[in-house]
Image (spheres, rainbow, N blue to C red):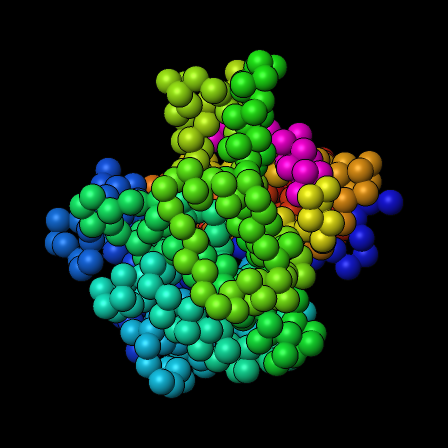
Amino acid sequence: MGFPKNFLWGGATAANQCEGGYNEGGRGLANVDLMPLGKDRYRVGTGEIRMFDFDENYFYPAQKSIDMYHKYKEDIALFAQMGFKTYRMSIAWTRIFPNGDEEKPNEEGLAFYEDMFKECKKYDIEPLVTINHFDCPMYLIKKYGGWKNRKMIDFYVKFAKALFSKYKGLVKYWLTFNEINMILHFPFVAAGLYFEKGENKKQVMITAVHHELIASALVTKIAHEIDPNNKIGCMMAAGSYYPETCKPEDYWKSICDNRESYMFIDVQSWGYYPNYALKWVEKQGAVIPFENGDKEILLNNTVDFISFSYYSSRVSSENPEKAKQTESNIFASVINPYLKASDWGWQIDPLGLRITMNELYDRYKKPLFIVENGLGAADKIENNGKIIDDYRIEYLKEHIQAMKDAIDEDGVDVMGYTSWGCIDLISNGTGEMKKRYGFIYVDRDNEGNGTLKRIPKKSFYWYKRVIATNGENLSLEGLDLYE
Ligand code: BG6
């Protein structure tokens, strides 16, 4: 009983939130570089404000981030000290294809990640690679309109093919798109989308979704052809919706809200759009831009495993006035009075993780991989230089326990767990550095000041022991040594 012997413990990051070096190594400009800190960030992310070039009135935290581009050896060594079995990271598309439509990949970009993977292998850390974590070359956005254009499929396929060929033998776990359901909520970030006046936004988003789903299926096929050892996963921003009350209308609303996320994963896992999804598209006054052969592509190339992020559960109400009380990780939800919340208002629900895992496993019957989970909190350095983040340990401990219950009590098949932002990085939602998730503190503030020094927090030593005991010891006992 307990966690399987080969359970993949580790941590997760995304290129745009940690690498920096935005104009080094021949890298091109991407949408994620243009996400400013401050109040306009959200509206740039939704495509309401068009930000196609840097504007001197804004600060862009991704330009430097935590400078992992130059510090990855030090960072991977720290992950190894914690005993990571896996490290989830993403590839910046514009390091490999700076504009996105070049014939040949940028060798310097390919070499950079090759080196990173080799560094991981040195410590027996298995890379888990997100091919696309929110980034899209700006050139493709300006010239083709991002994922609303079907040509994006070819550019993405070429990009993925370059990765599978170059890293054969070095990488075997791949995720096609990070949080594919985020397209409906943060479309410029998730798919390089912006909207023309009077345009049916839902149609634009549904078109982009269909293109990503076809692209995902095509690269699943290619990955398997290039190396039959490759395992490909989809990735969903998860967190089940509960009904606000037992009023049937509230329950029905929660089913509909859950389906707005499931429908993407249904296609990637089952190979077809279920009837409710087809009806939903119709109700949006939209159509899915099917072309000849699309249905076969989807049906014949389903994913090997289901990965997801989980930070919180959500709550649905049939009363539209209540529908938007909180925006936990971009998704609107009613506040759940039974739960506490983080300082950023994200509600904390470990049992919700077990519920979500059970729902996903019942639905898909494929192995699950929890590739993001964690607590964003402001940390304080004590006078003795230590960071005592018991609140983070508490959050992770309860969630890992819930995951253990899902495995032990419910028989859910889980491949691994990578906590989000294992080293402090830039927040996707707010652009802040202050919202920290890491086991490793990085000396940098919201405005970009700081030495970038890395300091292990108390949670670093806690997680190290969790991994060493394969999840058997989750307690804080004995860790006061580090205080
Ligand atoms: C997920 C994303 O939505 O949540 C990450 O995949 C993101 O990129 C994470 O960082 C946490 O959100 P935030 O807004 O706290 O950074």
Q: Quadrant of the N terminus?
A: top right
Does residue 330 show up? yes
The mark tally for this picture is 0
Residue at x 64% of width, y 74% of height: 224
Name the residue at the right extreme.
Answer: 1
Query: Is 59 included in the stretch rendered in magenta?
Result: no
Residue at x 52% of width, y 69% of height: 293
Report whether 1 appears left or right of 373: right
> Splitting the image into 4 quarters, where does residue 16 fall?
bottom left
At which x and y percent is residue 13?
49, 56
At which x and y percent is residue 19?
39, 63
| In this view, 323 is above or below 209 | above
| In this view, 365 is above or below 333 | below
> Splitting the image into 4 quarters, where does residue 11 fall?
bottom right
Residue at x 40% of width, y 21% of height: 320
Q: Nearer the viewer, residue 82 or 171?
A: 171
Identify the magenta region.
342-360
Report whether 423 appears left or right of 64: right
Report whether 265 appears left or right of 39: right
